[in-house]
């Protein structure tokens, strides 16, 4: 089977994703009977490209450019044109729009509009952007249901580590009651560094140099990124209908270092914890500095690691920990979502073959 | 859709599973369009039952019996007879044999024979038993492929916490290179207790009283249970073809308490770690006492908790932590596997509806 992809945004994540598709070409064919073609790319700085030749030229010229992603009305026109050109693939459920534009965290735009137009045009929509699911999940989920297409966003919270797929695919009949987690790498790195006596500005500068902090650092340190992730998780896992502004939000500041050191010296750890739970019919979501006892699983989450603890009815607590995150992991999340779409198109019987594949050789 | 179940073994786990099916009846119908009927039960102590009336009588009479599970040749005859009676359901891929008999950890019997006969008779096979996948995974996976039926065993390692489903369903295109984990609750509880100065025998007695330790405690303290889990994980995740006897195995003993206290006082933790990784073409699997630095994720796994760290190519390390385990969690693992089978039988389009279900109401 062949999926046709239109990339909206061609910054670092999308470029790594395109490279990953090349690296995984043989494995995708062998394990999933899947071929993936990029048939269009929209960039803000370097224009848009339809068709394989134009796409190749754009990838060749700008594969190393660290340009910001695309935005603005001309991108929507490009997207509409691309959906028209690929109408046959859309009709066959083989068209996927991959959205990776820069985020306006408060409004979730322009990503939300791109996804709405993509679904309306019969494409599946995949994004690594937390904006759409944090700000407009309900509307987009309904649009996807109406269009009978997938809207997937595994990369929105913990890069490639499965959260949404984990709950959807592997926890049937389990009800998530609440969650708490350390979900922002920049602030967790800074808290860990400040515990050891390093300064706020110095720790932040390191995260910016290493490309981990958001371009606008206040999104990290004021807790906006964590609030967006809390809203995204609450919307999907707790059937909430909130936005990042509905999250009771705190961040970290230079004086936080003193609190972190005091906690550490008492065998405790100061962490920026994102959480939500259902309180009667309301969802209470917040991002707060919490002083955790040393044996709390979240207390042991060091540096750039992330962790999420799901509270469930049947399984009580399950935790998943991301030990390393980066561009490849985010790109992988997009790939995992694309494979999910491909699996939908495969007959269930064929799907069943690979999981129970017999071992290759005896290697005791 | 209706699935017909034959239960082989009706001890604590199977009884909790049968009760869970009742509790989840409405949710299964609503969320998965699934009805589940128990059409046969084989027990060692209380005989076997075919048909809904006999099954009801057996469940009513022995629902509270803590009897050991079934075994012996008469169970195989019962199973063959049950497969014949349900030949139509088997033909329609609607028949599932749920295997929960007591484990012979070295040979994986009688569970392995039960599963082989079930698959040969056109049934899917589901088990919470680590024996078959630890001792005979290759042969059973091939039998399942030949029969074009599912062989599932989510409960074999960490009760209901998804491990095998996690890798199969949510990590497409990711290659697992190795793993390390704390997978035996009894020894981890004992190590944690001995760190605090409690005695070996006292800690073991508590685990036996609480029904966590194996009936034959040497299976836990000599590392056999952990070795079987290591073999199961290696067979499935690393395509090994080993048995528990191929695992380099150590256990814990009364003098281990002194080592655990010494490690703790130095800010380190002593843990019984099960691990495996590919070394060129060989699989090196072991269960060993390891003194871990305090910031190792496994060092923070307290009491009866379990944790598994997967080392992968694309996502580097991912960890999943089971914060509480018990009868309900193991029973849930069986239910999750039954739902996986039901999902196979559903058209992909229908499957797609529920995941993107729109939020029910606005609850900011």
Image (cartoon, coloured by chain):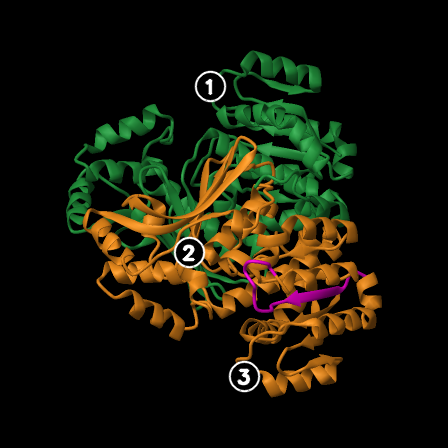
Chain colours: A green, B orange
Q: Secondary structure at mark 3?
A: loop
Q: In this image, B268 relative to A10: left or right?
A: left
Q: Residue at x 70, y 66 (%)?
A: B97
Q: In this image, A243 relative to A359: left or right?
A: left
Q: CA distance from mark 3 to mark 2?
A: 28 Å
Q: What is the crowding at mark 3: few (fewer than 14 residues within 10 Å), some, or many (at least 20)?
A: few
* Residue that mark 3 sits on: B64
Which quarter shows the N terminus of chain A?
Answer: top right
Whether residue B357 is visible here, answered yes or no, is no
Part of the protein shown in magenta: B92-108
> What secondary structure predominates along the stretch shown in magenta?
loop
Q: How many dots with numbers?
A: 3
Which mark, residue B218?
Answer: none
* Label 3 with label 2: CB-CB less than 8 Å: no
When asked about the image quadrant of residue B130, the answer is bottom right
Q: CA distance from mark 2 to mark 1?
A: 42 Å
Establish if A68 lies above or below A153: above
* Residue that mark 1 sits on: A66
Rendering coords of residue A276 (x, y %)? 40, 56
Tag in front: 3 or 1? 3
Q: Residue at x 21, y 37 (%)?
A: A194
Q: Are marks 2 and 1 on the same chain?
A: no
- A185 magenta-colored: no
Rendering coords of residue A334 (x, y %)? 57, 35
> The disc numbered 1 marks a residue on which chain?
A
Q: Earlier in the sequence, mark 3 or mark 2?
A: 3
Q: Are marks 3 and 1 on the same chain?
A: no
* Residue that mark 2 sits on: B306
């Amino acid at each position: 089977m062949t999926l046709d992809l239109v990339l909206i945004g061609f910054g670092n994540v999308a470029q790594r994703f395109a490279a990953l598709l090349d690296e995984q070409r043989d494995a995708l064919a062998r394990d999933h009977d899947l071929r993936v073609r990029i048939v269009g790319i929209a960039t803000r700085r370097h224009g848009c490209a339809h068709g394989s030749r134009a796409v190749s030229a754009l990838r060749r010229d700008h594969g190393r450019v660290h340009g910001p992603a695309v935005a603005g009305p001309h991108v929507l026109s490009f997207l509409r044109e691309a959906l028209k050109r690929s109408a046959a693939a859309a009709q066959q459920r083989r068209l996927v729009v991959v959205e990776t534009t820069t985020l306006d965290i408060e409004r979730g735009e322009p990503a939300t509009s791109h996804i709405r137009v993509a679904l309306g045009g019969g494409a599946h929509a995949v994004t690594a952007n937390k904006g759409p699911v944090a700000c407009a999940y309900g509307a987009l989920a309904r649009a996807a249901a109406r269009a009978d297409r997938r809207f997937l966003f595994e990369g929105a919270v913990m890069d490639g580590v499965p959260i949404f797929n984990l709950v959807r695919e592997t926890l049937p009949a389990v009800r998530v009651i609440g969650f708490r987690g350390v979900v922002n790498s920049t602030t967790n790195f800074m808290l860990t560094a400040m515990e050891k006596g390093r300064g706020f500005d110095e720790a932040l500068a390191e995260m910016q140099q290493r490309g981990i902090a958001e371009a606008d650092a206040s999104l990290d340190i004021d807790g906006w990124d964590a609030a967006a992730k809390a809203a995204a998780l609450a919307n999907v896992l707790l059937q909430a209908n909130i936005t990042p502004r509905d999250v009771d939000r705190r961040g970290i500041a230079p004086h936080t270092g003193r609190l972190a050191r005091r906690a550490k010296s008492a065998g405790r750890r100061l962490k920026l914890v994102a959480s939500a739970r259902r309180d009667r019919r309301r969802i209470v979501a917040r991002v707060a500095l919490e002083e955790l006892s040393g044996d709390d699983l979240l207390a042991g989450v060091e540096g750039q690691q992330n962790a999420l603890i799901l509270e469930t009815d049947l399984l009580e607590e399950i935790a998943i920990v991301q030990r390393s995150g980066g561009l490849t992991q985010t790109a992988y999340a997009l790939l995992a979502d694309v494979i999910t779409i491909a699996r939908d198109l495969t007959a269930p019987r064929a799907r069943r073959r690979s999981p129970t594949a017999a071992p290759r050789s005896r290697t005791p």
